[in-house]
């Protein structure tokens, strides 16, 4: 939960968007983050864990494809014509169902392994090589 919160802060997401990403209520999210920051044990539903995993996977793949936070944010917020986005920004899909989150993750996996060519939005993005990230 701490890593999820750090990633979503890095992306500059609102609390409302964080709630959409996890599919949870505001009070649950705040309790989880509070307890995680205090290093208390958490019990999360499988659906929430799956969503966290999907978002962290997206983050990991974006780190491989971009040159830092600004490019990550840019990619997340730009409309992309190619499937699965169909003219929507990736962050919009991430705020829907787990399946939509996995669609975004699968798209990025394909980009990482070079299975489909970049579209116009993605052409300027280069692989991110700095693997040193400190979580506070």
Image (spheres, grey):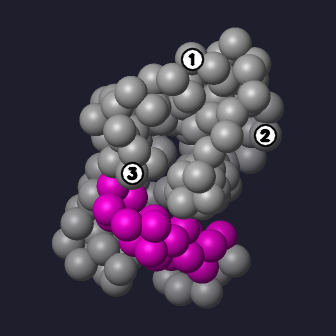
Q: Nearer the viewer, mark 2 or mark 3?
A: 3
Q: Position of residue 104 (x, y in %)?
A: 46, 69
Q: Earlier in the sequence, mark 2 or mark 3?
A: 3
Residue at x-position 75% and y-position 39%: 130
The numbered dot on residue 23 is 3
Q: Residues within 10 Å of mark 2 (few under 14, many from 20)?
A: few
The correct choice, above or below, for 32 with respect to 68 in the image is: above
Position of 84 compared to 129: left or right?
A: left
Q: Earlier in the sequence, mark 3 or mark 1?
A: 3
Q: Examine the structure image and report whether residue 94 is included in the region drawn in magenta.
A: yes
Q: Which residues are magenta?
A: 93-112
Q: Secondary structure beneath disc 2?
A: loop
Main SS category, magenta section:
helix
Disc 2 + disc 3, Cβ < 8 Å: no
For disc 1, the marked residue is: 34
The numbered dot on residue 131 is 2
Residue at x-position 46% and y-position 67%: 98
Q: Earlier in the sequence, mark 2 or mark 1?
A: 1
Q: Position of residue 30 (x, y in %)?
A: 45, 23
Residue at x-position 34% and y-position 83%: 83
Position of 119 compared to 88: left or right?
A: right
Q: Secondary structure beneath disc 3?
A: loop
In the picture as drawn, the residue positioned furthest to the left comes out as 87
In the picture as drawn, the residue positioned furthest to the right comes out as 132
The correct choice, above or below, for 133 with respect to 55 in the image is: above
Residue at x-position 62% and y-position 73%: 109
Q: Quadrant of residue 80?
A: bottom left
Spatial separation of the CA atoms under disc 3 and disc 1: 18 Å
Q: Secondary structure beneath disc 1?
A: helix
């Amino acid at each position: 939960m701490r890593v999820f919160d750090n990633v979503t802060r890095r992306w500059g997401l609102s609390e409302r968007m964080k709630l959409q990403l996890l599919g949870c209520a505001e009070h649950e999210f705040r309790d989880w983050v509070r307890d995680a920051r205090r290093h208390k044990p958490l019990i999360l539903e499988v659906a929430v864990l799956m969503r966290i995993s999907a978002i962290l996977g997206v983050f990991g793949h974006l780190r491989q494809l971009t040159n830092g936070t600004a490019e990550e944010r840019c990619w997340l917020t730009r409309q992309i014509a190619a499937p699965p986005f169909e003219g929507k920004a990736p962050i919009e899909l991430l705020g829907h169902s787990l399946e939509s989150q996995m669609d975004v993750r699968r798209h990025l996996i394909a980009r990482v392994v070079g299975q489909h060519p970049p579209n116009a939005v993605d052409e300027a993005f280069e692989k991110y090589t700095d693997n040193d990230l400190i979580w506070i």
